[in-house]
Image (cartoon, grey):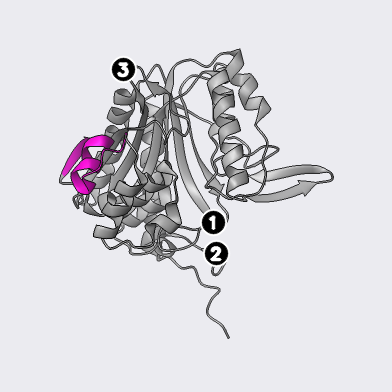
Amino acid sequence: MSDDWRPSCSLEALQLRAAVLHDIRAYFYVQNVLEVETPILCRSIGTDPYLDFFATSMGDTALYLQTSPEFSMKRLLAAGSGAIYQITKSFRQGESGRYHNPEFTMLEWYRVGFNLADLMDDVERLLVPLLRKSNFLESVQRLSYVDVFTQYTGLNPLEFSVLEYQQVAENLGFVDASTLCGNDHALWLDFLFSQCVQKKIAKNHLCLIYNYPACLPSLARLNKDNCLLVERVEVFIDGVEIGNGYFELTDAVEQEARFEQEILQRERNKALAVEKDTRFLAALKSGLADCSGIAIGVDRLLMILGKKEKIDEVLTFPIVNA
């Protein structure tokens, strides 16, 4: 008989997951951050032009498995929930590999009144004890995107010349980069960051890269001192990205404009069509207090804490034997 009914992870990995989830909940309990649940299956989905999603229907109503609980959680914030967090399943179509499974566990939280620096402090307070328990952490680094990108590529990420970016890519051996990235500044930044910068982030460090170029805004607000930057942070451990956070955009007009730009980009990418989440926009229009929030990939965190090579080693039943 086939043996593929067995779980992919070990008993020790199951125990580590339970311990880490306990520690996360204990941290937020002490911090007086409310645990919430929001729907996994919703009538709307995000417009990110580079994310694919799972869709189904109920009668004539389209429904979507959420790539993130962000919009629902912000609706709670706008309704006066105060600081909140949740640990939930999220889904992304077509993502499967060493660090990806189409169904994954996400920790997401929001702190009312926190700016980006406060959020980075919060990330450190949560993650450093977890890393030290696994004898992993050597130090914590905070680096600006502009500084670290320039250090490893020689390019200024706030300026864009296709010829200059092509030349750097070719010098580094990426001869097909121009075919992949075309004239898209954001794609060039993501490509060069993943290939040239991320791999060189020091091992055994928790690294927070902050203040991203404005062409990589996601849901972050513009930096009040420099409109070429957005108040965004990404979290890396041992060169692996585990989190993405923002000083959150609260301007409904700006948010709707970004939705429209992303929808156009999805059309150019020949991605599945989506519509703006009108309930989320209505929540922003009603008033969302200044806050910062972040999403952490729990499975990737467990890979690092458990010193595993593949995400399958921390999942009970990954997509290959679910």
| Residue at x-position 32% and y-position 61% | 174
- Mark 2 lies on residue: 319
Amino acid identity at mark 2: Ile
- Provide the residue span drawn in magenta: 139-158
Of the 4 image quadrants, the one containing the C terminus is bottom right
Dot 1: within a 10 Å radius of its alpha carbon, few (fewer than 14), some, or many (20 or more) residues?
some
Residue 79 lies, with reference to residue 150, above or below; the image says above
Q: Residue furthest left?
A: 138
Residues under labels 3 and 1: Cα distance?
A: 38 Å
Q: Position of residue 186 (x, y in %)?
A: 42, 42
* SS category of the residue bearing label 3: loop
Q: Which of the pair 12/122 is nearer the observer?
A: 122
Left or right of residue 256: residue 32: left
Of the 4 image quadrants, the one containing the N terminus is bottom right
Left or right of residue 256: residue 200: left
> Number of callouts in the render?
3
- Mark 3 lies on residue: 225
Residue 180 lies, with reference to residue 50, above or below; the image says below
- Mark 1 lies on residue: 102
Q: Position of residue 24 (x, y in %)?
A: 38, 39
Whether tag 3 and tag 1 are in contact, CB under 8 A, the answer is no
Dot 3: within a 10 Å radius of its alpha carbon, few (fewer than 14), some, or many (20 or more) residues?
few
| Residue at x-position 48% and y-position 15% | 289
* SS category of the residue bearing label 2: loop
Amino acid identity at mark 3: Asp
